[in-house]
Image (spheres, coloured by chain):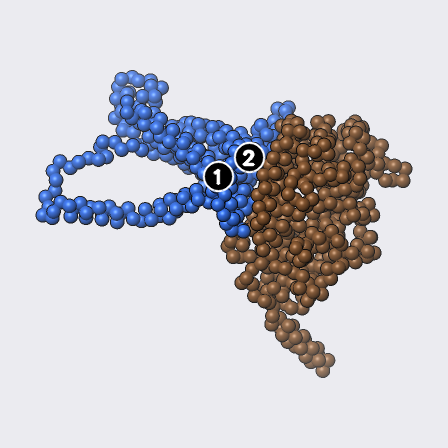
Chain colours: A blue, B brown
Amino acid sequence: MTASPQARSVPLAEPRTRAPRHRVRRRDWLTALLFLAPFMAVYLVLLVYPLFLGIWISFRDWDLMGGDYGWVGTLNYQDLWTDRNFWAAARNTLWFVALTVPSMTLIALLLALAVHGPGRIRAICRSVFFLSSVFSVTVVTLVWAMVLSPDRGLIAPVVQFLGGTPVNFLGSPTWAMPAIVVTTLWWGVGLPMALFLAALGSIPKELYEAAELDHASRWSVFWRITLPSIRHTLILVVVLQIVGQFQIFGQPFLMTQGGPANSTRTLVQYIYETSFRDWLVGYGAAMAMVLFVLMMLFSMLQLWLGRQGDDR
Amino acid sequence: MHRSKALAALALTTALTTGGAAGAAEIQLMRFFGDCQNDYGSVNDASEANGECGIITALVNEFNATNQGGHTVTVQTAEWGAYYDLLTATFQTGNIPDVAVMHSSVMPDFVSRDLLTPLGPLFQEAGIDTADFVPAALQNASANDEVYALPFDLHALLFHINVDLMEQAGFVNEDGTVRLPTSPEEFIEMGKQFEEATGQNFIAVESQSAEGMMVRFFNSLVWQQGSTTLADDGTSANLNGPEALAAATFIKQIYDEGLADPGLDYPGAEQAFLNGQAGIIINGTWVVDSYNAQAEGGSVPLQNYVATNVPALMGEEAVWADSHMWVIPRDESRAPEEQEAAVAFLTFLNDNNFEWSRTGHLSVRQSVIDSPEFAALPHRANISNTSQIARAVPTTQNQRSIYNAIMSDFNAMWLTGAEPQAALDSAQSQVERILRRANRGG
């Protein structure tokens, strides 16, 4: 995440060479470039170029099927300002991120702590918890739409048995988003759990042995050894989650189509609809820019917060 | 001797058939209407099929089995909600279908960008008589004085009625006809009586986001008052007038009074009606055949089924309608024999327009409408004048996003308790924004 002093370790003795210094330096440069080139090429073609193309398109009236109708200045952005559906989508997306990212991180950490360590049952649990991540979004949403269904679902009979009326989760503006959050948690918890497991595995055993000698409680072991040791992974997980969950699309698109009453339409779905249903690619690009800025701000904030601890 | 003669005849037939297939082409058909290959995959006679999906599947099979040119139509089906996105995508990927189904409300998007093949001269060559199309259908299929589509039906919104439940509530006249409300007040009053007498919902209707059945009902109610939701030239929205407010208020009241379950999606609403849990389902012409078959077949609790026009609740009779049409998307790389095959297929569909009208859709061919077999179809007497009261949304681009914008705001009325005025204001601003884009003169 941050450039620590160790990363730039300077060799104590300069290697002796006959070649003049500037030529060596140039050769180093060339080697570096050679190693960087494949990445740079991919990065420029697939990331930098589309980003700037996107910015350029967002200032034009660009039609998916009819081509480019020319420069419209900030019209797309002005339209965004008054587009209620856009703001609703932005609100829904933020709400989804606020619900998902903390709970996903917490659950992934708890699961990792529970299944970390030796033992066959733990190994089985590790695979089981990770397994849901291999399903495609279509399968996951299909399964959960069935689970949540008020007439044929898994939850409905339980509620009925207890004497209640089954909730139509996906048909209720209040419950549709939480239902999608639960689906997402079930689907996506595997990867952050795996990251936490890797981090937990790399904590030196000596630290725990020392803590044991000092009769430290399990709570303080977790709080003083485990958590600080996996801090960087924690930040990584949170940033990945923020970036990933801001782009939520498949789950609401397949489970609720953005409804009921607009309560689950997210930014990416609205961008998709604007660009590919209404063919307004320019307007869609402007929305994508806003999403990009939002994601960048939140990730930067997270990185900055993470760095605060390092300086201490 | 006899046998050798037969063999010779067989050989001759084979030779002729093979000879005829010289210009045979395999063409791609892209459509919605669902996939029912399991039930109708081997049915080669359209008259044996039922329902939209069954009939179109059997029609394609029949064409493949019987057409003189030896052409083959292969079908790609897409789900209704994703259909146009997929069709749009084919123009980018180059895998453009040779024939595609299209709603008349969507056609302006494609025509204005020159993405469809003009069909006028091709129809003339193939002997398709455009004068036989009812005027509304021909208008739907035309733009800028050119025909771009083969109209296949007009489909309108209807009231589908469970007569037994209506009788239980005392709404069946002496002559056996069902009494329907004539004003919003009477509608609500009857609904309350109905629910008291039967313990079931008066209305079943898709109320979630996918279909927007209530937007179609809303449009109908606004037209009944002599107004429109969009200006006739398609350049401005008219959702903040008193007519729109009256219609929206009435629709909200249906839910507020508990006459309809707001939690029902499309299959849920159908299920409720077929299970005898609702007196009336508001749905389109496309289900008449299917409901009728199920009611007669005894497979569902619904027994005594009748379809009627949406009653004139707010003035004159008027009802929302759209049109299914077949188009040949423009593709420069299409071989001439493929285009020929596509036109042959359209001709075949037009010749069999009656089979399609068995779904419950209104035929677009005057000759079919006037035919005795059309009149003999079940429930057609009640809806014989539907095409006269049918109204279509004005020709403008981006109808789908206009429809979706109104739908989202409307759902909020019964799902989150939004006030009709607020819902309409929001819809108005959304639609104005969309229209500003649609009318950039592109």
Q: Give the secondary structure at mark 1.
A: loop
- Numbered mark located on residue A222 in the image: none
Foreground disc of the pair 2, 1 = 1
Task: Return the residue at label 1.
Answer: A74
Chain letter for mark 2: A
Q: Residues within 10 Å of mark 1 (few under 14, many from 20)?
A: few
Q: Residues within 10 Å of mark 2 (few under 14, many from 20)?
A: some
Task: Return the residue at label 2.
Answer: A83
Residue B364 visible in the displayed image? yes
Q: Amino acid at mark 1?
A: Thr
Residue B305 visible in the displayed image? no
Please provide percent x and percent y for residue B403. 63, 41
Quadrant of the frame with the N terminus of chain B = bottom right
Chain letter for mark 1: A
Q: Is the residue at mark 2 from the same chain as the one at mark 1?
A: yes
Q: Amino acid at mark 2?
A: Asp
Please provide percent x and percent y for residue A296. 40, 34
Please provide percent x and percent y for residue A68. 50, 49
